Image (spheres, helix red, strand yellow):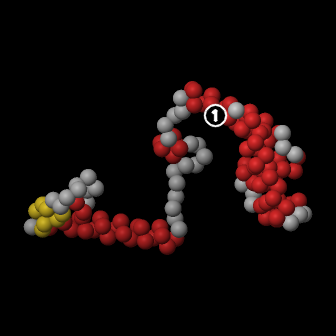
């Protein structure tokens, strides 16, 4: 017979709880620990961190609860206000903010696509964001 600490295997045990088990059970626990450690090492070495989310929302639905109709309406109104505020910006600022925050382009990529220096894009985005802030504060 072997003695194991249940706290090592079950997270809901907050203090040590020793139990006598057969050698087969103790060996199964040890084998499970070895396989789990080997799996963690393999995923770390191969950077194999996978997600269940295949753009069908499976993982998102499992993690997040559904929004209430009130929250959906608030989100819709907020997005409409944001799009209206972006439309009030000068054309270049609006395009650069859209490219950076919505399309996910880097400032360097935007500068390269427009044939300008990266600092010009960075300054335009910063000014646009300050202007957006003023527009949104005035609309509230």
Image-based side of 30 in relation to 109, left or right: left
The residue beneath circle 1 is 75
- x and y, in percent, of residue 17 in the image: 15, 59
Q: Residues within 10 Å of mark 1 (few under 14, many from 20)?
A: few
Quarter of the image where the C terminus is located: top right
Q: Determine the residue located farthest toward the top in the rendered image.
A: 69
- x and y, in percent, of residue 112 in the image: 85, 64
Q: Residue at x 75, y 49 (%)?
A: 129
Q: Residue at x 57, y 27 (%)?
A: 70
- Residue 53 appearing in the image: yes
Q: How many marks?
A: 1
| Depicted 67 relative to depicted 23: above or below | above
Quadrant position of residue 114: bottom right
Q: Secondary structure at mark 1?
A: helix
Q: Residue at x 67, y 32 (%)?
A: 76
Q: Residue at x 18, y 61 (%)?
A: 16
- Give whichever of 13, 96 is nearer the camera: 96
| Depicted 55 relative to depicted 25: above or below | above
Image-based side of 130 in relation to 91, left or right: left
């Amino acid at each position: 017979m072997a003695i194991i600490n249940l706290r090592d295997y079950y997270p809901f045990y907050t203090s040590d709880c020793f139990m006598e088990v057969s050698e087969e059970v103790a060996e199964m626990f040890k084998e499970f620990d070895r396989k789990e450690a080997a799996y963690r090492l393999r995923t770390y070495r191969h950077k194999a961190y996978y997600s269940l989310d295949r753009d069908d929302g499976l993982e998102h639905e499992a993690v997040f609860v559904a929004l209430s109709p009130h929250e959906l309406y608030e989100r819709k109104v907020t997005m409409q206000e944001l799009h209206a505020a972006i439309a009030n910006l000068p054309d270049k600022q609006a395009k650069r903010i859209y490219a950076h925050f919505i399309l996910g382009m880097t400032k360097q990529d935007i500068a390269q696509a427009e044939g300008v220096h990266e600092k010009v894009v960075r300054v335009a985005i910063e000014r646009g964001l300050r202007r957006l802030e003023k527009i949104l504060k005035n609309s509230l």
